Amino acid sequence: MTNAVSKNPDVVLIGSGIMSATLGILLKELEPSLTIEVIERLDVISGESSDAWNNAGTGHSAFCELNYTPQKEDGSIDISKAVKIAESFELSRGFWAYLVKKGYIKSPQSFINNVPHISFVWGGENVFYLKKRYKALTANPLFKGMVYSEKWPQLEKWMPLVMDGRDPGIEVAATYMDIGTDINFGALTRALFDHLKTLPGVTIQMACEVRDLEKENNGSWNVTVKDLKTDEKTHLLSKFVFIGAGGGSLPLLEKSNIEEAEGYGGFPVSGQWLRCTNEKIIEQHYAKVYGKASVGSPPMSVPHLDTRIIDGKKNLLFGPYAGFSTKFLKHGSYWDLAGSLELDNLFPMLSAGLHNIPLTKYLISQASQSPEDRIESLKDYLPYGDINDWELEIAGQRVQVIKKDEDEGGVLEFGTEIVSAGDGSIAALLGASPGASTSVGVMLDVLKRCFKTKIDSPQWHSKLKELIPSYGQSLSQSEELCYKTRKESASQLQLKFFEYADKVS
Protein backbone atom coordinates (compact mmCIF):
# COMPACT_ATOMS: atom_id res chain seq x y z
CA MET A 1 0.00 0.00 0.00
CA THR A 2 1.40 3.35 -1.03
CA ASN A 3 0.66 6.86 0.17
CA ALA A 4 2.78 8.61 -2.45
CA VAL A 5 1.45 11.49 -4.52
CA SER A 6 0.90 9.86 -7.89
CA LYS A 7 -0.42 12.77 -9.97
CA ASN A 8 -0.86 16.51 -9.99
CA PRO A 9 -3.93 17.08 -12.18
CA ASP A 10 -5.20 20.61 -12.64
CA VAL A 11 -8.76 19.46 -11.90
CA VAL A 12 -10.27 16.59 -9.92
CA LEU A 13 -13.89 15.70 -10.62
CA ILE A 14 -15.49 13.45 -7.99
CA GLY A 15 -18.39 11.41 -9.36
CA SER A 16 -19.27 10.38 -12.91
CA GLY A 17 -22.72 11.93 -13.14
CA ILE A 18 -24.08 14.55 -15.52
CA MET A 19 -22.62 17.45 -13.52
CA SER A 20 -19.02 16.22 -13.60
CA ALA A 21 -19.35 15.27 -17.27
CA THR A 22 -20.69 18.72 -18.17
CA LEU A 23 -18.06 20.58 -16.19
CA GLY A 24 -15.29 18.40 -17.61
CA ILE A 25 -16.24 19.15 -21.22
CA LEU A 26 -16.78 22.85 -20.55
CA LEU A 27 -13.30 23.12 -19.01
CA LYS A 28 -11.60 21.18 -21.81
CA GLU A 29 -13.33 23.31 -24.44
CA LEU A 30 -12.35 26.51 -22.65
CA GLU A 31 -8.82 25.41 -21.67
CA PRO A 32 -7.70 22.36 -23.70
CA SER A 33 -4.37 22.12 -21.88
CA LEU A 34 -6.01 21.35 -18.51
CA THR A 35 -5.39 17.90 -17.05
CA ILE A 36 -8.44 16.29 -15.44
CA GLU A 37 -8.77 13.27 -13.15
CA VAL A 38 -12.25 11.76 -12.65
CA ILE A 39 -12.86 9.56 -9.60
CA GLU A 40 -15.88 7.22 -9.56
CA ARG A 41 -16.63 4.78 -6.73
CA LEU A 42 -18.75 2.42 -8.87
CA ASP A 43 -17.47 0.34 -11.76
CA VAL A 44 -19.94 1.94 -14.19
CA ILE A 45 -20.37 5.49 -15.45
CA SER A 46 -23.52 7.29 -14.30
CA GLY A 47 -24.68 4.51 -12.01
CA GLU A 48 -26.42 6.66 -9.43
CA SER A 49 -28.75 9.69 -9.82
CA SER A 50 -28.03 10.35 -13.51
CA ASP A 51 -29.04 6.83 -14.56
CA ALA A 52 -32.31 6.70 -16.49
CA TRP A 53 -34.11 4.49 -13.98
CA ASN A 54 -32.83 6.48 -11.00
CA ASN A 55 -33.52 9.98 -12.28
CA ALA A 56 -36.95 11.58 -11.94
CA GLY A 57 -35.78 14.72 -13.76
CA THR A 58 -36.17 13.69 -17.37
CA GLY A 59 -36.72 16.98 -19.13
CA HIS A 60 -37.68 19.48 -16.45
CA SER A 61 -38.21 22.65 -18.47
CA ALA A 62 -41.02 24.01 -16.24
CA PHE A 63 -43.64 23.51 -18.98
CA CYS A 64 -45.79 21.18 -16.90
CA GLU A 65 -44.43 21.05 -13.32
CA LEU A 66 -47.06 22.85 -11.24
CA ASN A 67 -44.88 23.06 -8.13
CA TYR A 68 -42.69 25.58 -9.99
CA THR A 69 -45.63 28.01 -10.28
CA PRO A 70 -47.15 28.46 -6.80
CA GLN A 71 -50.18 30.61 -6.20
CA LYS A 72 -49.47 33.57 -3.93
CA GLU A 73 -51.70 34.76 -1.11
CA ASP A 74 -53.21 37.45 -3.33
CA GLY A 75 -54.27 34.78 -5.84
CA SER A 76 -51.68 35.65 -8.48
CA ILE A 77 -49.29 33.06 -9.92
CA ASP A 78 -45.58 33.33 -9.19
CA ILE A 79 -43.80 32.22 -12.38
CA SER A 80 -40.29 33.38 -11.40
CA LYS A 81 -38.97 29.88 -10.63
CA ALA A 82 -40.52 28.43 -13.79
CA VAL A 83 -38.91 31.16 -15.91
CA LYS A 84 -35.52 30.58 -14.30
CA ILE A 85 -35.67 26.82 -14.86
CA ALA A 86 -36.97 27.13 -18.44
CA GLU A 87 -34.20 29.56 -19.31
CA SER A 88 -31.58 27.32 -17.74
CA PHE A 89 -32.93 24.33 -19.67
CA GLU A 90 -32.44 26.26 -22.93
CA LEU A 91 -28.76 26.74 -21.98
CA SER A 92 -28.49 22.95 -21.70
CA ARG A 93 -30.24 22.42 -25.04
CA GLY A 94 -27.93 24.90 -26.74
CA PHE A 95 -24.84 23.18 -25.33
CA TRP A 96 -26.06 19.70 -26.32
CA ALA A 97 -26.77 21.02 -29.82
CA TYR A 98 -23.16 22.24 -30.03
CA LEU A 99 -21.88 18.80 -29.00
CA VAL A 100 -23.98 17.13 -31.69
CA LYS A 101 -22.89 19.68 -34.30
CA LYS A 102 -19.22 19.01 -33.49
CA GLY A 103 -19.75 15.26 -33.71
CA TYR A 104 -18.95 14.65 -30.03
CA ILE A 105 -22.37 12.99 -29.72
CA LYS A 106 -23.31 10.96 -32.78
CA SER A 107 -27.06 10.49 -32.36
CA PRO A 108 -29.24 13.00 -30.48
CA GLN A 109 -32.08 10.45 -30.37
CA SER A 110 -29.89 8.31 -28.13
CA PHE A 111 -30.62 10.73 -25.28
CA ILE A 112 -33.31 13.29 -26.23
CA ASN A 113 -36.72 12.81 -27.86
CA ASN A 114 -39.90 14.83 -28.18
CA VAL A 115 -42.58 13.93 -25.65
CA PRO A 116 -45.41 16.44 -25.07
CA HIS A 117 -45.60 18.02 -21.60
CA ILE A 118 -49.09 18.24 -20.08
CA SER A 119 -50.37 19.79 -16.85
CA PHE A 120 -53.67 18.18 -15.85
CA VAL A 121 -56.05 19.17 -13.04
CA TRP A 122 -59.61 18.52 -11.95
CA GLY A 123 -62.05 20.39 -9.72
CA GLY A 124 -63.23 23.97 -10.12
CA GLU A 125 -60.56 25.58 -7.93
CA ASN A 126 -57.71 23.78 -9.67
CA VAL A 127 -59.11 24.55 -13.13
CA PHE A 128 -59.24 28.24 -12.19
CA TYR A 129 -55.61 28.03 -11.01
CA LEU A 130 -54.41 26.31 -14.19
CA LYS A 131 -56.03 28.90 -16.46
CA LYS A 132 -54.38 31.72 -14.50
CA ARG A 133 -51.07 29.85 -14.71
CA TYR A 134 -51.45 29.47 -18.44
CA LYS A 135 -52.12 33.18 -18.94
CA ALA A 136 -49.19 34.16 -16.72
CA LEU A 137 -46.74 31.80 -18.42
CA THR A 138 -47.69 32.50 -22.03
CA ALA A 139 -47.00 36.19 -21.52
CA ASN A 140 -43.34 35.11 -21.40
CA PRO A 141 -41.47 34.13 -24.60
CA LEU A 142 -40.24 30.88 -23.05
CA PHE A 143 -43.79 29.53 -22.86
CA LYS A 144 -45.18 30.74 -26.17
CA GLY A 145 -46.96 27.94 -27.99
CA MET A 146 -48.51 26.43 -24.87
CA VAL A 147 -52.15 25.43 -25.47
CA TYR A 148 -54.93 25.42 -22.86
CA SER A 149 -58.20 23.50 -22.98
CA GLU A 150 -61.12 22.47 -20.81
CA LYS A 151 -62.86 20.61 -23.64
CA TRP A 152 -63.25 16.87 -23.20
CA PRO A 153 -62.61 15.88 -26.87
CA GLN A 154 -59.36 17.84 -26.91
CA LEU A 155 -58.16 16.30 -23.66
CA GLU A 156 -59.05 12.83 -24.98
CA LYS A 157 -56.89 13.53 -28.01
CA TRP A 158 -53.94 14.61 -25.87
CA MET A 159 -54.16 11.83 -23.27
CA PRO A 160 -56.78 9.17 -24.09
CA LEU A 161 -55.92 6.80 -21.23
CA VAL A 162 -56.11 9.61 -18.66
CA MET A 163 -59.61 10.57 -19.81
CA ASP A 164 -60.94 7.04 -20.33
CA GLY A 165 -63.33 6.16 -17.50
CA ARG A 166 -63.23 9.60 -15.91
CA ASP A 167 -66.38 11.13 -14.39
CA PRO A 168 -67.71 13.60 -17.02
CA GLY A 169 -69.41 15.63 -14.30
CA ILE A 170 -66.11 16.85 -12.85
CA GLU A 171 -64.45 19.97 -14.26
CA VAL A 172 -61.10 19.24 -15.90
CA ALA A 173 -58.45 21.28 -17.68
CA ALA A 174 -54.99 20.81 -19.17
CA THR A 175 -52.17 22.70 -20.81
CA TYR A 176 -50.21 21.12 -23.64
CA MET A 177 -46.66 21.88 -24.81
CA ASP A 178 -45.80 20.04 -28.00
CA ILE A 179 -42.07 20.79 -27.84
CA GLY A 180 -41.57 19.05 -24.50
CA THR A 181 -38.78 16.49 -24.35
CA ASP A 182 -37.77 13.32 -22.54
CA ILE A 183 -34.10 12.97 -21.71
CA ASN A 184 -32.13 9.88 -20.81
CA PHE A 185 -29.46 11.50 -18.66
CA GLY A 186 -27.67 8.21 -18.18
CA ALA A 187 -27.14 7.86 -21.93
CA LEU A 188 -26.18 11.53 -22.24
CA THR A 189 -23.67 11.28 -19.40
CA ARG A 190 -22.04 8.19 -20.88
CA ALA A 191 -21.81 9.92 -24.28
CA LEU A 192 -20.11 12.92 -22.66
CA PHE A 193 -17.59 10.71 -20.86
CA ASP A 194 -16.97 8.71 -24.04
CA HIS A 195 -15.89 11.99 -25.62
CA LEU A 196 -13.91 13.13 -22.56
CA LYS A 197 -11.91 9.87 -22.59
CA THR A 198 -10.64 10.69 -26.08
CA LEU A 199 -9.16 14.02 -24.99
CA PRO A 200 -5.51 14.37 -23.96
CA GLY A 201 -4.92 14.87 -20.25
CA VAL A 202 -8.16 13.21 -19.09
CA THR A 203 -8.05 10.10 -16.86
CA ILE A 204 -11.02 8.27 -15.36
CA GLN A 205 -10.51 6.04 -12.31
CA MET A 206 -13.37 3.57 -11.81
CA ALA A 207 -14.11 1.60 -8.61
CA CYS A 208 -12.10 4.18 -6.69
CA GLU A 209 -13.34 6.21 -3.75
CA VAL A 210 -12.22 9.55 -2.36
CA ARG A 211 -11.53 9.00 1.32
CA ASP A 212 -10.20 12.40 2.37
CA LEU A 213 -9.64 15.98 1.23
CA GLU A 214 -6.99 18.13 2.84
CA LYS A 215 -5.85 21.58 1.85
CA GLU A 216 -2.09 22.11 1.57
CA ASN A 217 -0.25 25.29 2.53
CA ASN A 218 0.19 26.23 -1.12
CA GLY A 219 -3.60 26.19 -1.66
CA SER A 220 -3.73 22.87 -3.51
CA TRP A 221 -5.97 20.01 -2.42
CA ASN A 222 -4.53 16.67 -1.34
CA VAL A 223 -7.14 14.12 -2.42
CA THR A 224 -6.81 10.65 -0.90
CA VAL A 225 -8.14 7.97 -3.25
CA LYS A 226 -8.66 4.31 -2.41
CA ASP A 227 -8.88 1.63 -5.09
CA LEU A 228 -11.83 -0.49 -3.93
CA LYS A 229 -10.53 -3.59 -5.70
CA THR A 230 -6.92 -3.55 -4.48
CA ASP A 231 -7.25 -1.39 -1.31
CA GLU A 232 -4.29 0.65 -2.59
CA LYS A 233 -4.29 4.31 -1.60
CA THR A 234 -2.90 7.11 -3.72
CA HIS A 235 -2.88 10.90 -3.42
CA LEU A 236 -3.70 13.54 -5.99
CA LEU A 237 -2.58 17.15 -5.64
CA SER A 238 -4.91 19.48 -7.49
CA LYS A 239 -5.58 23.21 -7.78
CA PHE A 240 -9.33 22.66 -8.15
CA VAL A 241 -11.76 19.99 -6.92
CA PHE A 242 -15.39 19.59 -7.89
CA ILE A 243 -17.57 17.32 -5.77
CA GLY A 244 -20.38 16.11 -8.00
CA ALA A 245 -21.11 12.87 -6.20
CA GLY A 246 -24.89 13.21 -5.82
CA GLY A 247 -25.93 12.13 -2.35
CA GLY A 248 -22.28 11.43 -1.57
CA SER A 249 -21.32 15.09 -1.96
CA LEU A 250 -22.21 16.19 1.57
CA PRO A 251 -19.86 13.81 3.45
CA LEU A 252 -16.99 14.79 1.13
CA LEU A 253 -17.76 18.48 1.53
CA GLU A 254 -17.60 18.01 5.29
CA LYS A 255 -14.16 16.41 4.95
CA SER A 256 -12.90 19.56 3.22
CA ASN A 257 -13.47 21.59 6.40
CA ILE A 258 -14.05 24.79 4.43
CA GLU A 259 -15.80 27.53 6.36
CA GLU A 260 -18.55 27.86 3.74
CA ALA A 261 -19.70 24.27 4.39
CA GLU A 262 -20.44 24.80 8.08
CA GLY A 263 -24.01 24.13 9.11
CA TYR A 264 -24.98 22.14 6.02
CA GLY A 265 -26.79 18.86 6.50
CA GLY A 266 -28.77 16.47 4.36
CA PHE A 267 -32.11 14.69 4.54
CA PRO A 268 -32.20 11.52 2.41
CA VAL A 269 -35.35 10.54 0.53
CA SER A 270 -35.73 7.32 -1.41
CA GLY A 271 -37.89 7.06 -4.52
CA GLN A 272 -40.07 4.43 -6.14
CA TRP A 273 -41.98 4.17 -9.42
CA LEU A 274 -44.70 2.01 -10.83
CA ARG A 275 -43.47 0.70 -14.17
CA CYS A 276 -46.03 -0.49 -16.72
CA THR A 277 -45.52 -4.02 -18.04
CA ASN A 278 -48.48 -4.05 -20.45
CA GLU A 279 -47.32 -3.09 -23.95
CA LYS A 280 -50.86 -2.25 -25.09
CA ILE A 281 -51.19 0.39 -22.36
CA ILE A 282 -47.71 1.77 -23.02
CA GLU A 283 -48.54 2.28 -26.69
CA GLN A 284 -51.73 4.23 -25.94
CA HIS A 285 -50.02 6.99 -23.96
CA TYR A 286 -47.42 9.44 -25.22
CA ALA A 287 -46.92 12.38 -22.86
CA LYS A 288 -45.60 13.53 -19.52
CA VAL A 289 -48.76 14.30 -17.54
CA TYR A 290 -48.11 16.20 -14.32
CA GLY A 291 -50.74 16.97 -11.68
CA LYS A 292 -50.85 18.84 -8.40
CA ALA A 293 -49.37 17.44 -5.23
CA SER A 294 -51.90 16.59 -2.53
CA VAL A 295 -52.53 19.26 0.08
CA GLY A 296 -49.75 19.13 2.68
CA SER A 297 -47.45 17.01 0.52
CA PRO A 298 -43.87 18.18 -0.22
CA PRO A 299 -42.84 19.45 -3.69
CA MET A 300 -41.02 16.19 -4.42
CA SER A 301 -44.35 14.34 -4.40
CA VAL A 302 -45.81 15.86 -7.57
CA PRO A 303 -47.37 12.85 -9.35
CA HIS A 304 -46.86 12.21 -13.03
CA LEU A 305 -47.76 9.62 -15.66
CA ASP A 306 -44.57 9.66 -17.62
CA THR A 307 -43.62 8.39 -21.08
CA ARG A 308 -39.92 7.60 -21.10
CA ILE A 309 -37.65 6.63 -23.99
CA ILE A 310 -34.88 4.48 -22.51
CA ASP A 311 -32.31 2.86 -24.78
CA GLY A 312 -34.64 3.30 -27.74
CA LYS A 313 -37.61 1.63 -26.03
CA LYS A 314 -40.81 3.37 -24.98
CA ASN A 315 -41.70 2.94 -21.29
CA LEU A 316 -44.47 4.21 -19.03
CA LEU A 317 -43.92 5.11 -15.38
CA PHE A 318 -46.08 6.57 -12.65
CA GLY A 319 -44.94 8.15 -9.43
CA PRO A 320 -42.91 9.04 -7.61
CA TYR A 321 -43.67 7.33 -4.35
CA ALA A 322 -41.35 8.55 -1.65
CA GLY A 323 -39.80 6.62 1.19
CA PHE A 324 -37.19 7.07 3.87
CA SER A 325 -33.75 5.52 3.95
CA THR A 326 -30.67 6.58 5.87
CA LYS A 327 -28.56 5.94 2.75
CA PHE A 328 -27.24 8.97 0.84
CA LEU A 329 -26.69 6.88 -2.30
CA LYS A 330 -28.60 3.96 -3.80
CA HIS A 331 -25.37 1.97 -3.52
CA GLY A 332 -24.47 3.62 -0.22
CA SER A 333 -24.44 2.69 3.46
CA TYR A 334 -27.24 2.80 6.02
CA TRP A 335 -24.76 4.70 8.20
CA ASP A 336 -24.56 7.62 5.76
CA LEU A 337 -26.99 9.86 7.65
CA ALA A 338 -25.44 9.23 11.06
CA GLY A 339 -21.97 9.72 9.61
CA SER A 340 -22.92 13.15 8.25
CA LEU A 341 -23.78 14.53 11.68
CA GLU A 342 -21.28 17.06 13.04
CA LEU A 343 -21.34 19.68 15.77
CA ASP A 344 -21.92 22.53 13.31
CA ASN A 345 -24.89 20.93 11.52
CA LEU A 346 -26.56 19.05 14.39
CA PHE A 347 -28.73 21.97 15.53
CA PRO A 348 -29.80 23.00 11.99
CA MET A 349 -30.75 19.38 11.24
CA LEU A 350 -32.73 18.99 14.47
CA SER A 351 -34.48 22.32 13.87
CA ALA A 352 -35.33 21.42 10.30
CA GLY A 353 -36.68 18.09 11.52
CA LEU A 354 -38.96 19.77 14.06
CA HIS A 355 -40.26 22.16 11.42
CA ASN A 356 -40.91 19.33 8.96
CA ILE A 357 -42.77 16.76 11.03
CA PRO A 358 -45.51 16.57 8.34
CA LEU A 359 -42.83 15.54 5.84
CA THR A 360 -41.69 12.75 8.15
CA LYS A 361 -45.27 11.53 8.52
CA TYR A 362 -45.70 11.70 4.75
CA LEU A 363 -42.58 9.60 4.14
CA ILE A 364 -43.67 7.02 6.71
CA SER A 365 -47.10 6.79 5.09
CA GLN A 366 -45.53 6.43 1.64
CA ALA A 367 -43.11 3.75 2.80
CA SER A 368 -45.93 1.74 4.36
CA GLN A 369 -48.18 1.77 1.26
CA SER A 370 -49.43 -1.52 -0.08
CA PRO A 371 -49.56 -2.30 -3.83
CA GLU A 372 -53.30 -1.62 -3.67
CA ASP A 373 -52.65 1.83 -2.14
CA ARG A 374 -50.27 2.72 -4.98
CA ILE A 375 -52.78 1.64 -7.60
CA GLU A 376 -55.42 3.88 -5.99
CA SER A 377 -53.08 6.85 -6.47
CA LEU A 378 -52.50 5.79 -10.07
CA LYS A 379 -56.25 5.74 -10.74
CA ASP A 380 -56.37 9.53 -10.34
CA TYR A 381 -54.45 9.58 -13.63
CA LEU A 382 -55.42 6.24 -15.11
CA PRO A 383 -58.99 5.44 -14.02
CA TYR A 384 -58.82 1.89 -15.37
CA GLY A 385 -55.43 1.16 -13.80
CA ASP A 386 -54.94 -2.52 -12.95
CA ILE A 387 -52.41 -3.78 -10.42
CA ASN A 388 -51.49 -6.66 -12.75
CA ASP A 389 -50.14 -4.22 -15.37
CA TRP A 390 -47.56 -2.57 -13.12
CA GLU A 391 -44.47 -3.47 -11.11
CA LEU A 392 -42.53 -1.51 -8.52
CA GLU A 393 -39.20 0.01 -9.61
CA ILE A 394 -36.70 1.44 -7.11
CA ALA A 395 -35.32 4.85 -8.09
CA GLY A 396 -32.24 6.68 -6.86
CA GLN A 397 -31.64 8.39 -3.53
CA ARG A 398 -32.06 12.14 -3.21
CA VAL A 399 -30.51 14.15 -0.40
CA GLN A 400 -32.39 17.38 0.29
CA VAL A 401 -30.28 20.26 1.58
CA ILE A 402 -30.54 21.41 5.19
CA LYS A 403 -28.76 24.63 6.12
CA LYS A 404 -28.49 27.10 8.96
CA ASP A 405 -31.11 29.81 9.27
CA GLU A 406 -31.02 32.72 11.71
CA ASP A 407 -34.76 32.65 12.36
CA GLU A 408 -35.60 28.95 12.16
CA GLY A 409 -32.29 27.42 13.25
CA GLY A 410 -32.32 25.16 10.22
CA VAL A 411 -34.36 24.94 7.02
CA LEU A 412 -34.99 22.15 4.54
CA GLU A 413 -34.44 23.23 0.93
CA PHE A 414 -36.02 21.56 -2.10
CA GLY A 415 -33.64 22.41 -4.90
CA THR A 416 -30.04 22.49 -6.08
CA GLU A 417 -27.30 24.40 -4.29
CA ILE A 418 -23.63 25.07 -4.95
CA VAL A 419 -21.27 25.43 -1.99
CA SER A 420 -17.83 26.76 -2.84
CA ALA A 421 -14.75 27.99 -1.01
CA GLY A 422 -14.06 31.71 -1.02
CA ASP A 423 -10.85 31.19 -2.99
CA GLY A 424 -12.65 29.11 -5.62
CA SER A 425 -10.42 26.07 -5.11
CA ILE A 426 -13.27 23.66 -4.35
CA ALA A 427 -16.99 23.46 -5.06
CA ALA A 428 -19.71 20.94 -4.29
CA LEU A 429 -23.20 20.43 -5.66
CA LEU A 430 -25.89 19.56 -3.13
CA GLY A 431 -29.60 18.87 -3.49
CA ALA A 432 -31.87 17.42 -6.14
CA SER A 433 -34.53 18.69 -8.57
CA PRO A 434 -34.38 20.27 -11.11
CA GLY A 435 -30.74 19.14 -11.16
CA ALA A 436 -29.79 17.36 -14.38
CA SER A 437 -32.00 19.39 -16.73
CA THR A 438 -30.25 22.58 -15.64
CA SER A 439 -26.76 21.05 -15.50
CA VAL A 440 -25.18 23.52 -17.94
CA GLY A 441 -26.50 26.58 -16.09
CA VAL A 442 -25.40 25.10 -12.76
CA MET A 443 -21.90 24.39 -14.06
CA LEU A 444 -21.64 27.90 -15.53
CA ASP A 445 -22.31 29.10 -11.99
CA VAL A 446 -19.42 26.93 -10.78
CA LEU A 447 -17.15 28.51 -13.41
CA LYS A 448 -18.20 32.00 -12.33
CA ARG A 449 -17.43 31.22 -8.69
CA CYS A 450 -14.23 29.26 -9.14
CA PHE A 451 -12.63 30.66 -12.32
CA LYS A 452 -13.49 34.32 -11.78
CA THR A 453 -10.63 35.89 -13.71
CA LYS A 454 -10.77 33.48 -16.64
CA ILE A 455 -14.51 33.55 -17.25
CA ASP A 456 -14.43 37.30 -17.86
CA SER A 457 -11.50 37.07 -20.26
CA PRO A 458 -12.19 37.74 -23.95
CA GLN A 459 -11.00 34.23 -24.84
CA TRP A 460 -13.35 32.40 -22.48
CA HIS A 461 -16.27 34.72 -23.19
CA SER A 462 -15.91 34.22 -26.93
CA LYS A 463 -15.66 30.44 -26.55
CA LEU A 464 -18.68 30.30 -24.23
CA LYS A 465 -20.73 32.15 -26.85
CA GLU A 466 -19.73 29.45 -29.33
CA LEU A 467 -20.57 26.64 -26.90
CA ILE A 468 -23.87 28.17 -25.75
CA PRO A 469 -25.28 30.70 -28.25
CA SER A 470 -27.57 32.35 -25.68
CA TYR A 471 -24.79 32.73 -23.08
CA GLY A 472 -25.01 36.07 -21.30
CA GLN A 473 -28.42 36.92 -22.79
CA SER A 474 -31.94 36.64 -21.44
CA LEU A 475 -34.32 34.51 -23.48
CA SER A 476 -37.17 35.46 -21.17
CA GLN A 477 -36.77 39.10 -22.18
CA SER A 478 -36.54 38.61 -25.94
CA GLU A 479 -39.07 36.69 -28.00
CA GLU A 480 -36.88 37.00 -31.09
CA LEU A 481 -33.82 35.57 -29.34
CA CYS A 482 -35.84 32.77 -27.71
CA TYR A 483 -37.35 31.82 -31.07
CA LYS A 484 -33.98 31.86 -32.85
CA THR A 485 -32.21 29.89 -30.12
CA ARG A 486 -34.87 27.19 -29.95
CA LYS A 487 -35.03 26.85 -33.71
CA GLU A 488 -31.26 26.34 -33.96
CA SER A 489 -31.06 23.78 -31.14
CA ALA A 490 -34.13 21.93 -32.45
CA SER A 491 -32.44 21.58 -35.84
CA GLN A 492 -29.26 20.08 -34.38
CA LEU A 493 -31.08 17.85 -31.89
CA GLN A 494 -33.67 16.75 -34.46
CA LEU A 495 -36.56 17.99 -32.33
CA LYS A 496 -39.90 19.58 -33.15
CA PHE A 497 -40.14 23.32 -33.59
CA PHE A 498 -43.30 25.32 -34.12
CA GLU A 499 -44.33 28.85 -34.97
CA TYR A 500 -45.67 30.64 -31.90
CA ALA A 501 -49.44 30.76 -31.67
CA ASP A 502 -51.72 31.70 -28.77
CA LYS A 503 -54.62 29.32 -28.48
CA VAL A 504 -57.29 29.14 -25.79
CA SER A 505 -60.18 26.77 -26.32
Image (tube, rainbow, N blue to C red):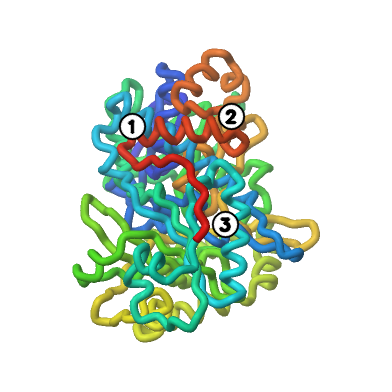
Residue farthest along the front direction in this orientation: 505
Residue 2, percent from left and from top = 36, 36
Residue 393 horizontal/vertical position (percent):
31, 68
Closest to the observer, 174 or 4:
174
Q: Which mark is residue 492?
A: 1
Taking depth in this image into account, of 124 and 412 the one nearest to the observer is 124
Q: Amino acid at mark 2?
A: Gln
Residue hosting label 2: 473
Expressed as whole percent of the image width and height from the top left, the position of residue 415 reads 57, 54
What is the quadrant of residue 480 in the picture? top right
Looking at the rendered structure, which numbered label has been put on residue 132?
none
SS class of the residue under badge 2? loop
Relative to the observer, which residue lies in front, 8 or 230? 8
**Mark pair 1, 3: CA separation:** 29 Å
User: Which residue is drawn at the image coordinates 38% and 40% (left, top)?
Assistant: 497
> Which residue, given by chain and number where applicable, does mark 3 sit on?
134
Outermost residue on the right side: it is 407
